[in-house]
Image (tube, helix red, strand yellow):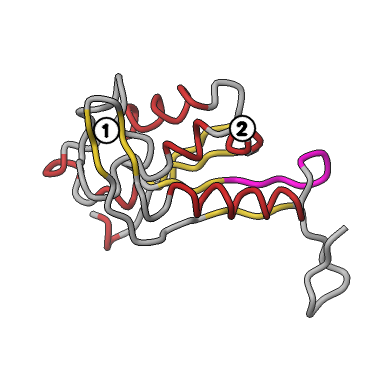
């Protein structure tokens, strides 16, 4: 088991991968690629899974709200940014299928009334890649989000 270095009594149950490296994803008729991050995210997750085997530890992914867009049937999902599809390569990979939980960071979508973002659509996109895994939607609640 892995222990938190400062407190040997704290046992690590898992880790959340919030991979927010800069990216400039490219969309085409054949799908989406993110040259700066596709390989990097898979290598990172592979290293995490090697250190934290799935039978003993949870590994979750916090994905940008548009991170699983850019491919059918979500190729026109909003918002469209340079991060559209940033997590698609990981989702399609064998190692990506070892994730235990996927968290859609809906609070990162900007003002939903102006961006066209739909948390339901983002949830369905995540569920399409991980039909048997836990999928959550993170929202911001409080005066600064009103």
Q: Nearer the viewer, residue 102 or 50?
A: 50
Q: Which residues are magenta?
A: 54-60
Q: Residue at x 66, y 36 (%)?
A: 98
Q: Are marks 2 and 1 in contact (CB under 8 Å)?
A: no
Q: Is residue 64 above or below residue 132?
A: below
In this rendering, position of residue 30 left or right of residue 13: left
Q: Quadrant of residue 32?
A: top left
Q: Residue furthest bottom?
A: 6
Count neighbours of disc 2 (C-alpha within 10 A) and say few if under 14, some if 14 to 19, many if 20 or more: few
Q: Residue at x 39, y 27 (%)?
A: 125
Count neighbours of disc 1 (C-alpha within 10 A) and say few if under 14, some if 14 to 19, many if 20 or more: some
Question: Can you say which quadrant of the picture contains the C terminus?
Answer: bottom left
Q: Nearer the viewer, residue 5 or 143?
A: 5
Q: Is residue 18 above or below residue 131?
A: below
- Distance between the alpha carbons at the discs numbered 2 and 1: 28 Å
Sequence-first tag of 2 and 1: 2
Q: Is residue 57 magenta?
A: yes
Q: Position of residue 144 (x, y in %)?
A: 27, 63
Tag count:
2
**Circle 2 is placed at which residue position?**
94
Question: Can you say which quadrant of the picture contains the N terminus?
Answer: bottom right
Check disc 1 and report its element: helix, strand or loop. Answer: loop
Callout in the foreground (2, 1):
2
Which numbered tag is attached to residue 118? 1
Q: Position of residue 123 (x, y in %)?
A: 41, 30
Q: Residue furthest left?
A: 114
Which numbered tag is attached to residue 60? none
Q: Residue at x 34, y 40 (%)?
A: 33
Q: Residue at x 30, y 29 (%)?
A: 31
Check disc 2 and report its element: helix, strand or loop. Answer: loop
Q: Position of residue 38 (x, y in %)?
A: 44, 47
């Amino acid at each position: 088991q892995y222990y938190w270095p400062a407190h040997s009594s704290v046992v690590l149950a898992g880790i959340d991968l919030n991979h927010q490296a800069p990216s400039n994803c490219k969309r085409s008729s054949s799908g989406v690629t993110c040259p700066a991050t596709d390989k990097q995210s898979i290598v990172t997750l592979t290293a995490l899974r090697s250190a934290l085997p799935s039978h003993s530890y949870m590994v979750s992914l916090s994905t940008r709200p548009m991170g699983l867009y850019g491919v059918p049937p979500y190729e026109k999902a909003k918002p469209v940014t340079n991060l559209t599809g940033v997590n698609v390569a990981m989702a399609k990979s064998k190692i990506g299928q070892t994730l235990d939980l996927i968290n859609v960071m809906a609070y990162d979508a900007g003002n939903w009334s102006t961006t066209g973002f739909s948390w339901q659509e983002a949830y369905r996109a995540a569920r399409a890649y991980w039909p048997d895994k836990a999928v959550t939607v993170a929202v911001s609640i409080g005066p600064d989000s009103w």
